[in-house]
Image (cartoon, helix red, strand yellow):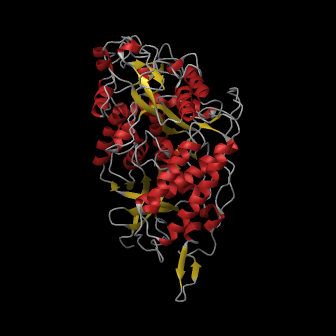
Amino acid sequence: FGEMVILTDCLVIGCGSAGLMTALELSKGGQRVALITKDMLGSNSGSFFKGGISAVPLQNGQPLEGDSFRKHIQDTMLSGAGLCRQEVVETFVKGAYREVIAPLIELGVPFSTTGGDVSPLSPRKVPERPSYEYSLQEEVGHSAARIFHTTGKNTGATVMAHLLVQVKQQTNITVYERHMAVDLLTPSKVDSINVTFKEDNTSQARPAGKRSEVRDEADYNRCIGAYVLDIEKARVQTFAAACTVLATGGCGRSYMYTSSPDTSTGDGVAMYYRLGHPVSNMEFMQFFPTCFYNPNPKNPDERRMLIAERMRSDNVKGRLTLSPESTEDIVEPFSPLGSSATREIVASAVDQVMKEHGVPHVYLNITPAVTGISEEDLKMEFREQYDMCMALGVDITKEAIPVVPAAHYTCGGIPVDMNGCTAVSGLYAVGQTACTGLHGANRLANSSLAESIFFARRAAAHAIQNYCTDQKKLRVGEGMPEWQSGRAVESKDEVQVAYHWDEVRRLMWNLVGIARTGERLIMAKRRIEVIRTEIHRYYWNYTLTMPFLELRNIALVAEIIINCALARAERRGTHQRIDCPEVKLNTEDLHDIFSPDIRPSFTGQPQPPMLKL
């Protein structure tokens, strides 16, 4: 093989907490790992995650007094609005401490052992338990104190830092920064993608690899690697592996306002769907109710700055208002709790108020005149937020903060089993890319990082046992073709890509946002179909770039979300169809809805039937 084909035991696509933990576990199991990331190591959603990690604390192997597995299971099921998979929830809850907290402690992650960092203004101040080593907090949605925080302000960044140190120490992990996966490869796809042109400009399709005379159906449904764009060198390489892991994060950037990093463009979901397999529960996008509104950010961090939910807790009593001068709580008509209501209620209320009044944002007021808290106490409690807002010209002790809801977490994704296995042999999905069944229609707070670590470890163990055998490694690279760009040329007009980028995100924000209606969704569906047709034409005419590939993915993900939202004619969890009746929660009603078959006919590729998992 030449330099354009890279052979490895395991290919991990994505370097968030799930990707890093998977790579680390595979490496410790003696496997050679290729770890690819679109940006640089550390630039992912895990680093922006400021919540804690939920797990029932154990003492002498038993749940700590005041908590139980049953309580955590009930909290998760209630948040998931009847769509959680009960067996997944039970397995996760019972194993979270041993499979998440304990391994992180072994890696040196410094979980807080004192309550000194719990402010009197915290919504849940928990008395210290002298007999227990770690400080625990009880937060919204949890019926007991089970949230572990690190000693730093940012638990996600702390965990990421320790994982990065470990990964960099592994000699059998090769990191490919500034590399982006284009598409996954299976034997059936290899047999059908090679298109050449004759001298008279007619096209000719033929098998790209050497096809076996006899190949069973199961062998066709096997992931053998991926095409990957080297962003700096503008070339596509072929990565061949015995197993492949998708850990590309969520799809927050499908929306105009998001708390997600710039890399969250639904790459894993889009690539998997293009193989012809369904994805699950994509209509359930969790929105954070208060993100700093900055129409002209100087850098991405200014665009996705979250305003702490503690600011509108019962203890602080901050109010969301329509104007900076007003003190009227705009959430009170939607909930007697007003601005201190749950995240979903507040986000939906703010969205509806913005649409009714035609305004781009609202305000969160925590000034002493509203909260009764002194300027000094506000600065002390919200020091990080105070400093960030001051840098953007807003003094939170003297003026209201401009805020807007933001796409925060993708509850759906690629359906997987308890080991992270997808419907494709040798292909795994972990982290926000996967739909494990844990979150259902709405993620319980502080559960995402725990889920990422939990399923990453299980996926790695399963892959080592089932796909990293000597016999299967011998087949790595078998019949793998190099990328062929055909007659594609370099584009001299990037305006088209930039225009569609903006159009997709605005369309999703305005028509497929928090509060949805059938009319808006039908309008969005018609427009996204036109956009995807134009993207398809561009794909075959021009050489690939990262902005275009991301556009290609967010447009497909947008179409999936729209169709799923249309199919679910009910109001449930984070899916707020305001023109449909609200589902009365029944935790016994555990089921999934799979995305409708929206694959457009213009692909020209044979598509497998939809799978019913």
> As drawn, is 167 to the left or to the right of 12?
left
User: Can I make out residue 240 in this image?
Assistant: no
The residue sitting at 53% across, 33% down in the picture is 354
Given residues 88 and 518, the one toward you in this image is 518
Quadrant of the drawing holding the N terminus: bottom left
Given residues 1 and 41, the one toward you in this image is 41
The residue sitting at 34% across, 36% down in the picture is 157
Image x and y of residue 539, in percent: 50, 67
Image x and y of residue 304, in percent: 39, 39
Tally the marks: 0
The residue sitting at 43% across, 69% down in the picture is 543
Q: Is residue 252 above or below residue 181?
A: above
User: Can I make out residue 377 in this image?
Assistant: yes
Q: Is residue 203 above or below residue 491?
A: below
Kindly indicate the quadrant of the structure image that contains residue 413.
top right
Kindly indicate the quadrant of the structure image that contains residue 381.
top left
Image x and y of residue 270, in percent: 54, 54
Q: Is residue 602 above or below residue 555?
A: below
Image x and y of residue 422, in percent: 57, 50
Q: Residue furthest bottom?
A: 199
Given residues 378 and 91, the one toward you in this image is 378
> As drawn, is 526 to the left or to the right of 106?
right
